[in-house]
Image (cartoon, coloured by chain):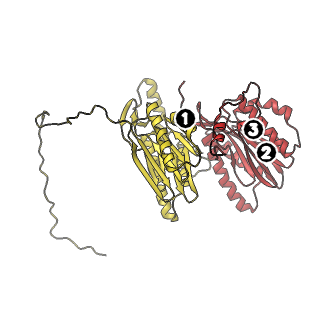
Amino acid sequence: MDIDLSAPHSMGTTIIGVTYNGGVVLGADSRTSTGMYVANRASDKITQLTDNVYICRSGSAADSQVISDYVRYFLHQHTIQLGQPATVKVAANLVRLLSYQNKNMLQMGVIVGGWDKYEGGKIYSVPLGGTILKQPFAIGGSGSTYLYGFFDQAWKEGMSKDEAEKLVVKAVSLAIARDGASGGVVRTVTINADGVTKNFYTGDSLPLWHEELEPHNSLLDILLASSSPEPMST
Amino acid sequence: MARFAADAPTRGGFSFDLCQRNEMLLKKGNQLPTFRKTGTTIVGLVFEDGVILGADTRATEGPIVADKNCEKIHYMAPNIYCCGAGTAADTEAVTDMVSSQLQLHRYATGRESRVITALTLLKSHLFSYQGHVSAALVLGGVDITGPHLHTVYPHGSTDTLPFATMGSGSLAAMAVFESKFREGLTRDEGIKLVSEAICSGIFNDLGSGSNVDVCVITRGQTEYLRNHQLPNPRTYVSSRGYNFLKGHTEVLSTKITPLKSKVEAAAEVDAMEE
């Protein structure tokens, strides 16, 4: 089978947004594919909209990047006019308006998450078509199909920050194991009253699931053995 | 043309009116004329002092090599260069257009152009043409905020990476990068790695070939090493040289047109008045 390098850049993806007692944790994998080729193995799918609101992107890379840019621009103006940070609800609704009004042209599903002083940590899902759904947790992307059952069993109201982050990392890691279109590293962004914390987890720090083997002579080992401590930074 | 609910009405640009008729003709059996593509291997990497871009030099028209030594590394600004893969006309046109826009922007702001500016201009143009402008680019440069390397895809999405490859030879070149790249390469190591990656594309990809072009961009200085390597010399060149003596070519017809040797100016010329 020939690799079609002119296929539109799509993010196979697994994206997750989870609220906890005090804020939200957003998580995503890092694989961007062009047909069957991995165009970027370390992409950052969690994009900043404002200081306190981030968006997880899935679907067409071009569409979601452009929408994020427009929303960031509108939110910046809105923040200046309002005189205070934008709320998560407003950010999510801006994404929804652009998504719904251009539904014939766009192919993207996103999760908007953040923290504001009125409502605290909130997650809004804006899938294909432009619906908006406020949820205590949301999953999206091709890898999410493998996580519905997992979240039904593992999700609890009122988790702590560490519990929530561990849950997100475990979930993305499980999806990566089963979904061919998800892979790379697990990136998380935690947003609460104190600010924003970003983390990334490489394959060696994640547990091995059913039938997964220990890495042997992996690129990570070779790189860590030689000079630089960090293989890739974005 | 993609109309965005948030945009002002568009002026000019590609008209999609004939697309249906073209599809009908294709179904009838007519073939679209082939256009010149740059099969291509283009690469870029970030090294300790800046950015190095590399490209092969083969331009193809279907299975035929249309140009054995074309230039795929395009000038955008004194500190920004862009490699282009895909349809040659599209990459030339889009890089020329953005280069002009950047120069106007430099005049308006009085500052050196930033790579992110070029990136935004390219990405918004390509997105509005919804992938029909077939230009896949590797954009690199050094500005006041540091060295930057980006890839731009025909549909308008971009990636920011420490090393990147595009074009039909990208898989061969990426294999070289993935095994040998590390952060903080020196200038010579970087040039060597880029040349290796391009050569990998030249020899393993049918759409890439001929020579290696390299461009090294650092703070304050850009070096365009045209034909840095020529790994495909012409074999079997006649050692006696080629001589086309008079009388070897048959003359079919002759027409001689005498040129006027001077132009007469008018006797009375009115002086210019304010």
Q: Which kind of residue does numbered mark 2 sit on?
A: Val
Q: Is residue A83 above or below residue B36?
A: below
Q: How many marks?
A: 3
Q: Which kind of residue does numbered mark 1 sit on?
A: Ala
Label number found at residue A48: none
Could you tell me which chain the residue with mark 2 belongs to? A
Could you tell me which chain the residue with mark 1 belongs to? B
Left or right: A31 with respect to B113?
right
User: Nearer the viewer's eye, disc 2 or disc 1?
Assistant: 1
Q: Position of residue B71 (x, y in %)?
A: 40, 44
Q: Position of residue A217 (x, y in %)?
A: 65, 32
Q: Is residue B78 above or below residue A100?
A: below
Q: Position of residue A104 (x, y in %)?
A: 62, 38
- Label 1 crowd bin: few (<14), some (14–19), many (20+), radius 10 Å: some
Could you tell me if residue B133 is visible in this image? no
**Which residue carries the number 1 mark?**
B175
**Which residue carries the number 3 mark?**
A205
Give the camera-side residue of A208 and B141. Answer: A208
The chain that appears yellow in the image is B
- Kind of element beneath mark 2: strand
Q: Residue furthest bottom?
A: B274
Give the camera-side residue of B135 and B112. Answer: B112
**Which residue carries the number 2 mark?**
A25
Q: Which kind of residue does numbered mark 3 sit on?
A: Ser
